[in-house]
Image (tube, helix red, strand yellow):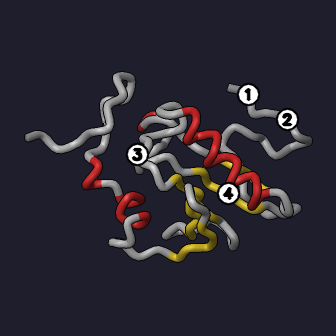
Amino acid sequence: MAPPYIVEPRMPEAMPLYDCPFCEIVAGRAPAEIFHEWDDALAIVPLNPVVDGHLLVIPKTHVADVGHDPEVSAATMRRAAELAASQWCNIITSRGRVATQSVFHLHLHLVPRSENDGLALPWYSGRGGKLAKH
């Protein structure tokens, strides 16, 4: 019998469930620094945080990305919003390899920000609040 796969016709790089590192963390079979836990999601510290306080918010249910299951995506965003309510931050997710997704389990990066922190988004010029020209 073939292993269970996440099937998404627009995403050929679907990941077998047994290869998903976030499912392994949710199941308690892989280590992670858990910042907060809800009944439906976890907030964990990523392996290589870009700033202090950088978190990943992941659903306990396996969905490949933000477009796979809107209900799970919305619930996960609600959890990220709860953490974001008391700070300035970016909340970032990607869908698909061409959009820089490398782990095919929905995850939201919550990246705290401070004035002049030097952390630039690739499409933002950082000059007077103008978007970079393409």
User: How many angstroms separate mark 2 from mark 4 (CA)?
Assistant: 22 Å
Q: Which is more toward the observer, 96 or 133?
A: 96
- The foreground one among 81 and 100 is 81
Q: Which residue is mark 1?
A: 133
Image quadrant in which the N terminus is located: top left
For marks 3 and 2, the one nearer the N-term is 3
Task: Confirm or deny contact between disc 3 and disc 1 (CB under 8 A).
Answer: no
Residue at mark 4 to residue at mark 3: CA–CA distance: 17 Å
**Residue 34 in sight:** yes
Q: Which residue is mark 2?
A: 130
Disc 3 versus disc 2: distance between alpha carbons? 32 Å
The residue drawn where x is 61% and y is 48% is 76
**Amino acid type at image mark 1:** Lys
Splitting the image into 4 quarters, where does residue 111 fall? bottom right
Percent across and percent down for residue 107 are 53, 51
Residue 25: percent from left, percent from top: 41, 67
Mark 2 or mark 4, which is nearer to you?
4
Q: Is residue 87 above or below residue 133?
A: below
The residue mark sitting in front, 3 or 2, is 3
The answer to whether residue 53 is left or right of residue 127 is left
Q: Residue at x 73, y 28 (%)?
A: 133
Residue 78: % across, % down = 70, 48
Q: Amino acid at mark 3?
A: Phe
Tell me which residue sits at (52%, 52%) in the image. 59
SS at mark 3? loop
